Every structure is written in structure tokens, then in C-alpha cells.
Image (tube, helix red, strand yellow):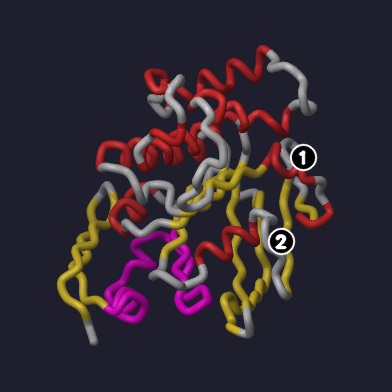
Amino acid sequence: MTSLLSAKNISFARDGNSILEQCSASIGAGEFVGLIGPNGAGKSSLLRIMAGLQSPDSGAIDLALNGTGTLQALATIAARERAQTLAYLPQQEIPAWPLQVEHLVGLGRAPWHKPMSGKSARDKQAIEHALYITELQTLRHRIVTTLSGGELQRALLARVFAGEPNIILADEPIAALDPYHQLHVMELLAEHAQQGGAVFAALHDLSLAARFCSRLVLMHHGKILADGEPIQVLTNENLQQVYGISAYVDCREDGVVIIPRKRVV
């Protein structure tokens, strides 16, 4: 496996409170990695630091730019170059302007052309493809501020795909979606990885994470407790320690199904 993005010994504190402590994680070409853990475990902070949106107190983030295969310090890479390789889908983003959906999706092409320049043929093709795979063609002229939460989430994901990044970092990409679109988004992310890209996504649905992700990273109190195949990570011991639940764990050919049974106090 070729590592495309690596976090080494990341520590981060806010207002004197430790958020992350000596966290190390990496994603490689062809991987769809699920970042799991309860609320407040540090998942969002780790993703933001790996995206270069937040500086850690200590540790290092290394990124391999498209086509290079060589890791280099993220902080030394120009923002535009970084954005051509790495895309970040935040949790609960609220658009600042009443743009049409297709214009919001088109913002994903910003790293590929100069400001105020017109869209190239490749830009238009990438935007159309993003609208198509996220099934947003019929909503292309809708104003984004009139969309439902799930529709907006799909539009923001389409913006990510329009930028044609090699690496996608996504913070709870299926949280606002109905079951059909949850499966659809997970399929799109898995396909991106299968085509040689890499995906690192924070997820709360453990069964979907186990079904679609090749590897899971389990966080607890700002630390990484486990990192491995779903069947190795989603043990009753880990679920009880991290989530405080007793669960029925069913290992099947198409993944691991988690059915919570009761809280463990």
C-alpha cells in the first residue's frame, strides 16, 4: 500500500483541554477508512488537522501530491496544490450565499483555474459528472438555501467530486441522509477508493462502516484505541469500553452487523 496522507504523533489542545493525544493514522491508495468513535472522541479535530485547516500543537502531517507518490510536509505545500489533491467535506456546512446548486458544485473547480477565468471544457465535464453521480441533475437550478439537509449534503459532496481530488476527508458524510442516500454516498466513496483514490470518513453508523470500509480507526478520549479490519476493531470489548454498550456482533460475508442491546453503566 502506498501511503497518500499520514498523521504522526498528533497532539492538540484547546483552552487547556486535551483534544488529541499522540494520534497517528495514515490512508493509502485504494483505501476507504472509517474513523469511528463516540461524540467528543476527537474525530473532527483529527480530520481538520489532516486537511490542513487546523495546526496541531505537535506532530506532523505528510501528503503525497497527485502523481508524485512522495510524501512531503503538508505545511510546505501551497494551498492551491494541496486543494488539487485533497478535499475536505465538513460537518453541517451552511452556504453563505444563495447560489444555485450547479454554481455551488462548480466551486469545486476553483483550485484548477485562475480567479475570474471562465470554465474550461474539463471544468464543465467535471461539474456535469459530479451532478450526475450524486443524482442532482433535477436540482441543478435550485437555490442551495432552499434545500433540505440531505439535499444540501449531497450538493456539498458533489462539489468535492467536481474538484477531482485524489484524497477525500469527510466528516459524517451520511449523517443527514435517508437510507437510500446513505447507501448511495457510501457506494460513491467506496468507488472512489476502488479507482485508486483514498477516503477517510468519520462515521457513526457502525454497520455501514463495517460493510463499506476496508479499515476502521477507533478513537476514544482523543486517542486511537484500535486500527485494523472491521472484524478486528468492532469487538464486544471495544464497543463496551468506547461506546458503553453491549451489542450483538454478527460477522457475515458482506460485512459486520452491529445491533446495540443495552447500555453498560
If the image is split into quadrants, where does the C terminus sit? Answer: bottom left
Mark 1 falls on what kind of element? Answer: helix
In this view, the residue farthest toward the left is 261
Residue 6: image location, x then y, percent: 66, 59
Question: Which is more toward the observer, 108 or 193?
Answer: 108
- Give the mark, 2 or 1, whose residue is nearer the N terminus: 2
Residue that numbered label 1 is attached to: 80
Name the image quarter holding residue 47: bottom right
**Is 172 on the left or on the right of 241, as rendered?**
right
Up/down of 177 relative to 162, above or below: below
Residue plotted at (22% across, 65% down): 249
Which kind of residue does numbered mark 2 sit on? Ile
Write down the residue under mark 2.
61
- The image position of residue 156, as x and y in percent, is 50, 38
Front-most of 188 and 93?
93
Q: Residue at x 65, y 76 (%)?
A: 11
Closer to the observer: label 2 or label 1?
A: 1
Q: Are marks 2 and 1 in contact (CB under 8 Å)?
A: no
Magenta segment boundaries in residue numbering? 216-244
Distance from the alpha carbon under mark 2 to that under mark 1 = 17 Å
Vertically, is 246 above or below 27? below
In the shown orientation, is residue 52 left or right of residue 149? right
Question: Is residue 47 placed above or below 153 in the rendered structure?
Answer: below
Q: Callout 1: 10 Å neighbours few (<14), some, many (20+)?
A: few
